[in-house]
Amino acid sequence: MNIVNGGVTAAKGFKAAGMNAGIKNNTKKDMAMIFSERPCVTAGTFTTNKVFAAPVKWDRNIVYNSEYSQAVVINSGIANACTGEEGDEACMREAKAASAALSIPESAVLVASTGVIGMQLPMDTIVSGISSLSGMLSGTTEAGTEAAEAIMTTDTRAKQVAVTVEIKGKKVTVGGMCKGAGMIHPNMATMLCFITTDACIDKGALQKMTSAIVDDSFNMISVDGDTSTNDTVLVMANGMADNECIMENTPEYDEFYGALSYVLTELSKMIAGDGEGCTCLFEVKVVNAKERQQARTLAKSIVTSSLTKAAIFGHDANWGRILCAMGYSGADFEPEKVDIYFESSAGKLKIVENGKATDYSEDKATEILSQNPVTAVADIKQGDVNATAWGCDLTFDYVKINADYRS
């Protein structure tokens, strides 16, 4: 597998565009489009929040019931959530406009929105934007970057990844972009992710691996414990690599799984590391657990602990908060057997052994915790199963950003 430059336009046959359509009433880009020259096998995962946005409802239907998809229209600034029948109608109007502009069926158009909940989309602006975007579509890296910039809300940077992998002599590319900085606590899966690939793959196989990888990537990140109304991951495969169709239970499935897993995991870490107001990515590894769910539960409990996140911000080796978070997680473990380490580019330090503090250097611990990223490792000595979760520190700026988000 090779890491390459780019995002959603890295794979053959995919074009993108991003622009300022006027939704946000400022100069920032606020609409994007992704288009495939060929119809795409499509997989997706979506928010489990019972309050879900109109685009989530629309996309679920397309992913589960349409033969294929070929385009995605995305806007930022307004989430189109809690908007009733008018919100559903807005999705339909977007699909009709994209269908007319791109000469594809309405049932091949996916839509996504992110931003303020409760506001209606300005449909004249959206429809005009779709028309403009269709004429701007390009397969260049720059076009992919412009699309990635257009889906940002409180993100501080665009998030893109692309890789290539050889499958039976054919070069297959997987690329993607995502947005997310606040209201991040996916549980499928405000967070949006779009993956494009030129692989030829069976739809059932693509959905199976997407769901499994999302569970170990996006479902293992948290910024603030809030699961959005709009969380969506979409994967589009147009088959233009001309590889033999990838099926389940084959070596080719495993090879492609590795490439898709890398892209989704890296995008997940980019979201966690760009959490609103954060200064560093906080990684938590629970090792030597007895079973998968035990390891996952413990890792997520630590990474979501507000007190632990605040300690990471303060570069304070307050390990008691980690053990405390493990204790209320609901997972069964033996506290008196736990070892805890802090690790970063400045080194690795054992601060707890068998549930008690070691004679560690506070100065060295502070040095380690002053880097980006920072990793906490909890060894619970019960088996050989590991899990990793990602989050970020909790800073003053998180409150500032969210106190005046609508303004």
Image (spheres, helix red, strand yellow):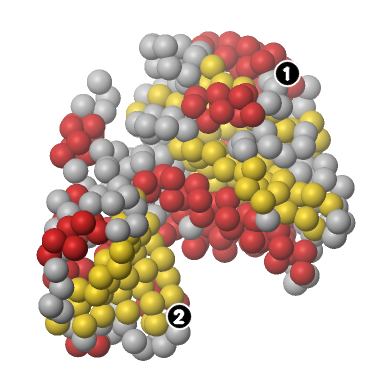
Q: Is residue 12 left or right of residue 217?
A: right
Q: Is residue 344 left or right of residue 68?
A: left
Q: Whole-Å distance between the Cαs marked 1 and 2? A: 51 Å
Residue that appears at 19% across and 50% down: 313
Please tell me whether residue 139 is drawn above or below residue 185 in the rendered image: above
> Residue 4: x percent and y percent?
64, 43
Q: Which residue is mark 1?
A: 100
Q: Which residue is mark 2?
A: 385
What secondary structure is found at the residue carrying circle 1? helix
| Image quadrant in which you'd find residue 58 | top right
Query: Which quadrant is the C terminus positioned in?
Result: top left
| Image quadrant in which you'd find residue 384 | bottom left
> Residue 153: x percent and y percent?
39, 29
> Residue 75: x percent and y percent?
50, 25
Disc number at residue 141? Answer: none
Of the pair 253 and 166, the residue shown nearer to us: 166
- Three-letter residue code for mark 2: Val
Residue that appears at 22% across and 39% down: 398
Residue that appears at 45% across and 26% down: 76
Q: Earlier in the sequence, mark 1 or mark 2?
A: 1
What secondary structure is found at the residue carrying circle 2? strand
Q: How many marks?
A: 2
| Image quadrant in which you'd find residue 5 | top right
Residue that appears at 24% across and 75% down: 350
Q: Is residue 382 visible?
A: yes
Q: Is residue 68 visible?
A: no
Q: Is disc 1 in contact with disc 2, using a CB cutoff of under 8 Å? A: no
Q: Residues within 10 Å of mark 1 (few under 14, many from 20)?
A: some
> Viewer-nearest of labels 1 and 2?
2
> Residue 367: x percent and y percent?
21, 56
Q: Is residue 338 left or right of residue 321?
A: right
